[in-house]
Image (cartoon, helix red, strand yellow):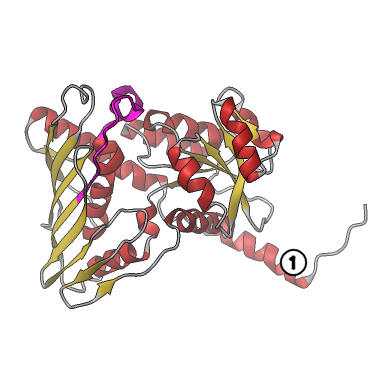
């Protein structure tokens, strides 16, 4: 085989990759790629209807493989996306993905109770990890996933797409730069009416319930709008369909206290539609409505400014930005530690609701 000396441009690119890796200690150095191959684990609605189409629009990553326990789904995916046989796995042979250089990232899109296991298995296979929200169902599971990724020197990103959305980012900036003074009150609500009676989100063992699914949007909003971590919470659950919601919450209301004096009044539900974020500051206000829809995020502020930046595809933007961060050796926007912070608060919310009293968050 004929070997040629690297060009000056190639040499500089190699040095740049090495310098970039130094920005993110512990991340495993790999040969430079133009795009990273993503394997979707779990082919439910979010993968089939949103992530796979979004991966046709990305610049820095692409759909390389799938992992499914439903063999009947494979032909349609192969026909639509041209996925080769060698990039298709099931849950039994998943660990063999370690031997496949075409797959760089594993995106875990499974029921919540399975997130931590497959994050760890992907990391042990040497793959970077995207994990759909919520990160896991306990803080201990989150910590285990973070540890697995750190030990294997791979990146871990949580699929909080709103932190990639420009109007949301502007609201975060306004709070952190105190454009209207310090945040005083955040009101955030996230929910929709779900008429299903047999879905896994109704099962406690699978990590179901409104708080895990939609409530983390409201919780995230309270945290990123104040720029602080809550120190105490009160909460209550309710249901209008007790014959269906026998194991998990249909609706949860929770209030958070922050160390700087701000408060948050939040709600989430599978029994009613709600999609609004309003922040009151010392000298004004700002709001987004809707604030966590798949498109059409918009809002306004007390000084007349409008939030109307357009994002063609939120999922594509999220995955592209995370993939580019990996390629450049930079930290991802929403690392595993961010998912862990949410689940610590979620645990306190469930404790407060069960006890019917205020719970401090350590």
- Would residue 144 be visible to someone looking at this image? yes
Relative placement, left or right, of 60 versus 191 is right
Q: Is residue 245 above or below residue 146?
A: above
- Would residue 155 be visible to someone looking at this image? no
Disc 1 element? helix
Horizontal and vertical percent position of residue 336: 41, 45
Horizontal and vertical percent position of residue 15: 67, 64
Q: Residues within 10 Å of mark 1 (few under 14, many from 20)?
A: few
Which residues lie in the magenta part?
Answer: 189-209
**Image quadrant of residue 99?**
top right
Give the quarter of the figure containing the C terminus: top left
**Image quadrant of residue 163?**
bottom left
Residue at x-position 7% and y-position 31%: 356
Horizontal and vertical percent position of residue 276: 21, 55
Horizontal and vertical percent position of residue 100: 68, 38
Q: Which residue is mark 1?
A: 10
Badge count: 1
In this view of the protein, which residue sits in the foreground, 282 or 68? 68
């Amino acid at each position: 085989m004929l070997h040629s000396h690297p060009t000056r441009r190639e040499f500089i690119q190699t040095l740049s990759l090495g310098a970039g890796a130094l920005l993110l200690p512990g991340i495993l150095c790999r040969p430079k790629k133009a795009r990273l191959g993503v394997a979707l684990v779990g082919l439910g609605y979010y993968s089939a209807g949103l992530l796979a189409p979004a991966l046709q629009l990305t610049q820095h990553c692409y759909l390389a493989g799938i992992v499914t326990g439903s063999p009947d789904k494979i032909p349609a995916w192969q026909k639509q996306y041209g996925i080769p046989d060698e990039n298709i796995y099931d849950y039994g042979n998943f660990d063999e993905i370690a031997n496949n250089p075409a797959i760089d990232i594993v995106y875990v899109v499974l029921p919540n109770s399975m997130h931590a296991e497959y994050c760890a298995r992907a990391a042990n296979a040497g793959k970077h990890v995207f994990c759909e929200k919520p990160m896991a169902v306990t803080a201990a599971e989150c910590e285990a996933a973070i540890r697995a990724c750190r030990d294997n020197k791979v990146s871990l990103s949580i699929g909080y797409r709103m932190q990639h959305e420009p109007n949301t980012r502007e609201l975060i900036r306004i709070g952190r730069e105190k454009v209207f003074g310090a945040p005083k009150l955040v009101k955030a609500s996230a929910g929709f009416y779900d008429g299903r009676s047999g879905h896994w989100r109704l099962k406690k063992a699978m990590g179901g319930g409104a708080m895990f699914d939609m409530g983390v949007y409201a919780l995230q909003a309270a945290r990123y709008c104040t720029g602080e971590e809550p120190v105490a919470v009160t909460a209550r659950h309710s249901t209008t369909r007790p014959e269906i919601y026998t194991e998990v919450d249909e609706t949860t209301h929770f209030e958070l206290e922050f160390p700087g004096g701000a408060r948050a009044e939040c709600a989430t539900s599978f029994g009613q539609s709600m999609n609004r974020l309003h922040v009151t500051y010392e000298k004004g206000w700002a709001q987004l409505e809707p604030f966590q829809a798949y498109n059409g995020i918009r809002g306004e502020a007390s000084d007349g400014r409008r939030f109307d930046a357009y994002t063609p595809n939120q999922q594509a933007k999220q995955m592209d930005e995370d993939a580019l961060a990996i390629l450049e050796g930079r930290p991802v926007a929403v690392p595993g530690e961010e998912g862990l912070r949410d689940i610590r608060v979620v645990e306190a919310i469930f404790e407060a609701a069960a006890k019917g009293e205020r719970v401090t968050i350590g």
